[in-house]
Each structure stands twice: as structure tokens, then as C-alpha cells.
Image (cartoon, helix red, strand yellow):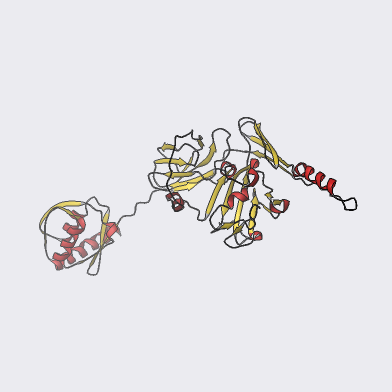
Amino acid sequence: MRNRLALLLILTLAAVASAAGRITINVNSQPIKEVLKEVKAQSGINLIYITSDIPDRKITLHLEDATLKECLDAILKDTRVTYSVMDNNIILRREAVLSPKRVISGFVREEESGEAAIGAIVRDANSGAFTTSNSNGFYSLPVTSSEADINVTLTGYTPMSIRLDSLKLDNRLDITLTPSGKLDEVIIVGDKNSELTFESPVIGNLSMNRHSITSTPTLFGESDIIKSLQFQPGVIPGVEGFAGLQVHGGSDDQNMYLLDNVPLYQVNHLAGMLSSFNTDAINNVDFYKSSFPSRYDGRLSSIIDIRTRDGNLTHRQGSWKIGLTSGSFNIEGPIIKNRMTYTISVRRSWFDLLSIPGIAIYNAVINENMSKIVSRHAFTDFNAKTTYHFNDRS
């Protein structure tokens, strides 16, 4: 059957070439597309092709009184472009080269604590394909070549470059990022429409880690997730100094708060003066105020997805903090090294202690027939979490 088809193609090309006459080509270092135009002009046969299928290559060719088939064979030699005859037309096509899709996947973690590095950009410099690590630090990057130059970047960490050769269909690559050292004076010029914004695979998403939240100036110096988000475009606090969040003109109840995938419906203390999120227990916050991923629903204005810390995989560590209105304590470490971790965070306010002098003075100066004020108000936040890594892929 194949021999018959080949014979039919040869006879058809011979018939077309006979009808078109003989062709003479004498070119030196001319682009292939220009040579094809000359063939079309001499033969009177339509050459149909997609411009991108014809390689941008120059050829030198000298043919005297040649057939159309001889011309096309010489012009398209070593180009992976084939041709076929249809009526009075010659159709040129580039042969499709199918290469198996290979996948590189793994976890991106911090070097010191083993915590998940969320939002790290993992890019293949050869193909330009890239992805980001999710809330668990996991990434999956498809590549088409058997080789890859992997570049990993995350703000606050030293960029990494890894060369991979002889890739299989399924490849495992765990990445450990090292915090970047102190820098000399740096002047940064940029805007919101930066290259990183356009290259992000998620539109309308802001990701903030614990360090970004604690460095945001707030009332009384108490770091707060919601007050940090109030500085973003399209967001207003509602009442100045309080932890309200009105996004693109919406109300407070049109925002969805998720704490490790659990929805919360009351997130404030003291009628909104402080939120109930203890910054010491927070690892990362994803704030969506434009387009929402399909896994979220139920709110109109925004999604605030908060992830708490998993705990240090290698050693125990702790911290404590005393502020104007509250104090906090955090401890974390491994239960089983590199396998099971714990983290405990406690925050307690002392508004009751601060109000005692003022209430005592008021009660001392009022008349005997007036009722005295007896008021004590405080709150305590307690966060505890245990994380167990079953295997390398869970």
C-alpha cells in the first residue's frame, strides 16, 4: 500500500512538473522563502505554507532545467519540511517532533528550620516554563527536554541554579533555600507593574510572610495581619486604627478568612481594635482581591488564606515579645527529627492592667451617690499545631 502511495505521489509530481515546465535556479546565500517565491514564479504552481514552518536559513543553489520535484528536494534538504500535491497546489508542512513530557517535582524548604518555602518561583531556563511552590512548599514543573537548567528564586533567600541531565519521565528534586545575607545600601526603582507581577501564574494575589507583617507600622506597635493588608491598593480600613477590611467597596462580611483551610467568622478582639491572629504563629498569608481560584467560594470581596507554622524539623527554638498592649510567647521544634514537629504560640493582652489606674482615679473622685466602675477586659490567643511527614510525597 505504501509503495503504491509513493508511486502515485511521484507520478503526480511528475505530471505537475511536466505541466509547469523546467526550472532554472541560480542563487547565492539567499533565504529559503525567497527561493520558493522564484520557484513559484517560474513554475506557475501555488506553493502554500505557513511562514513559521519555513526555517530562516540561507542557501546556495544552482539548478539548470530541473523538474519541480528536483527543485523542492534540493531547497528543503535537511529542513524537516515535507510537501504534498493537492490539485494545482504544493502544500509545505514542517514535520511535528513529539518529545515525551517530563515532570520535575519536589518540595522547597528553608534551610534553617525546614519550613515550607511558599511562593518560590521554580523556572526552567531552557524552555521558559515556570511554576511556584504551594502552601506546603510543593511544586511540579513539566519540561519537554531531557535536560533542564532549574533556577529557584524567593524574596529574602539566595537564588539557586541547578543543572539536570538525562531526565526521566518522573523526576524528584527537593530544594533547600538559604536566607540571603546582609546587603550594602541598595536603591530599588520599580512599580506595581513589575516583570515579576506579569510573570506570576496567579492574578490578583498578594503573598506575605511573617517578616513582612511584623515590619508593617501599626497602632501601638502591635503587628497585625489585617492592618498590614490595609495598605494594599483597593483596600480601606473602614474605621482608622481598627482591624477592619473593606475591599473594592465591599463590607467586612464579604471577606472570607481561612486558617489552615478552616473558615473563620469572628476574627477580631475589642470590637475590631486587634485581630485574633497571633503573628508569631503565622507562616504565610495569601490575599486574593481580584480573581479567586476555583477552590474558593462563598465571598464577594476577598479571600484571606492564612497558613500557620509547621514547626522546626531539626532543633528546638523559641521567642518572646512584650508590647504596649500585649505579650506573646512561641516555642517550636521536632518531636521526631525530620519527621514530626510541634509549635505552640500564646498571646495575652493586658488592657485590664492598663485600665486599673484610670478606673481607680475615677472611682476616687466621683460622688458617693454615683456608682463606681468595675471593669476588667483581656483576651488570650492560643495556637498549637502538630505536623507529621509520612513520606517524601506526603
Q: Residue at x 48, y 33 (%)?
A: 182
Q: Is residue 366 left or right of residue 80?
A: right
Residue 345 appears in view: no
Residue 268 in the image: x percent, y percent? Answer: 70, 51
Q: Nearer the viewer, residue 205 or 53?
A: 205
Counting from the top left corner in percent of width and height, residue 274 is at: 68, 49
Q: Tell me if I can see residue 6 in this picture.
A: yes
Which residue is at a point 14% across and 60% down the rendered structure image? 67
Quadrant of the rendered structure where residue 288 is?
bottom right
State the residue at coordinates (69%, 38%).
328
- Indicate whether 42 appears above or below 386: below
Nearest the camera: 295 or 45?
295
Front-lying residue, 118 or 52: 118
Of 324 and 102, nearer the camera is 324
Percent of width and height locating residue 184: 44, 34
Left or right of residue 166: residue 248? right
